[in-house]
Image (tube, rainbow, N blue to C red):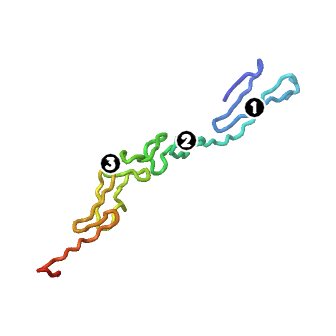
Amino acid sequence: MLIGTMFPGFYAILGGSQKHKIEFYYISSLLPILPFIDVLAFTETPRVPENPCIPSPCGPNSICQVKQGRPVCSCVANYIGSPPFCRPECVLSQECPWDKACINEKCQNPCINSCGSNAKCDVVNHTPFCSCLAGYIGDAFIGCSKIVTRKYLHDKIL
């Protein structure tokens, strides 16, 4: 509550809270006995709560949610860190462990779906290397075929 003086000897009592807005205006000649004095009058109306997330205080790649009237920030899905410093898990493969590669901004196994049939995959410095399994031959990235061996017995094929 606020008490203020408008004219010497005349006081106005003004009230309000954080949830209310006070509008002030002057009314001339309100009192017939004092027509030369302007009287300060006010009305109190409920204040519409403001959204603390507009504009967002969270920064890029983050989400703002209102909880108990306060903004709560978090990173968007698939991003790491803390607002306002949300970022993808990786941008370059060098940001990942040696046996992973940066695929769609996530450190993932680069061997998945890299090699053909009957081939194995080894990761070397973030890169998939395919090779045919023992007893197979071919392009390991496309597919490997079993090596056919023919046995000969005195110039005859068995």
Question: Of helix, strand and loop, which one carries label 2?
Answer: strand
Q: Residue furthest front?
A: 155
Of the image marks 2 and 3, the number of the one nearer the N terminus: 2
Residue 96, image x and y in percent?
A: 35, 47
Q: Which residue is drawn at 32% across and 67% down?
A: 143
Which picture quadrant has residue 87?
A: top left
Q: How far apart are marks 3 and 1 (CA)?
A: 65 Å
- Residue 118: give x, y in percent of width and height: 29, 67
Task: Assign the N terminus to one quadrant of the image.
Answer: top right
**Disc on the earlier residue, 1 or 2:** 1
Q: Would residue 73 be found to the left or right of residue 116 on screen?
A: right
Q: Which residue is tagged 3?
A: 97
Which residue type carries mark 3? Pro
Q: Is residue 66 left or right of residue 135?
A: right
Residue pictured at 29% horizontal, 64% vertical: 119
Q: Which residue is drawn at 88% across and 27% down?
A: 32
Which residue is situated farthest in the top direction here?
8
Mark 2 residue type: Arg
Q: What element carries label 3?
A: loop
Asked if residue 106 lies left or right of residue 8, the reply is: left
In the picture, the disc for residue 70 is: 2
Q: What residue type is labelled 1?
A: Phe
Q: What residue does disc 1 label?
A: 24
For label 2, the crowd category at 10 Å Cα-Cα, with few meaning under 14, some 14 to 19 and many 20 or more, is few
Rendered view: 47 above or below 153: above
Image: 6 above or below 74: above
* 50 relative position to 132: left or right: right
Which mark is nearer the camera, 2 or 3?
A: 3
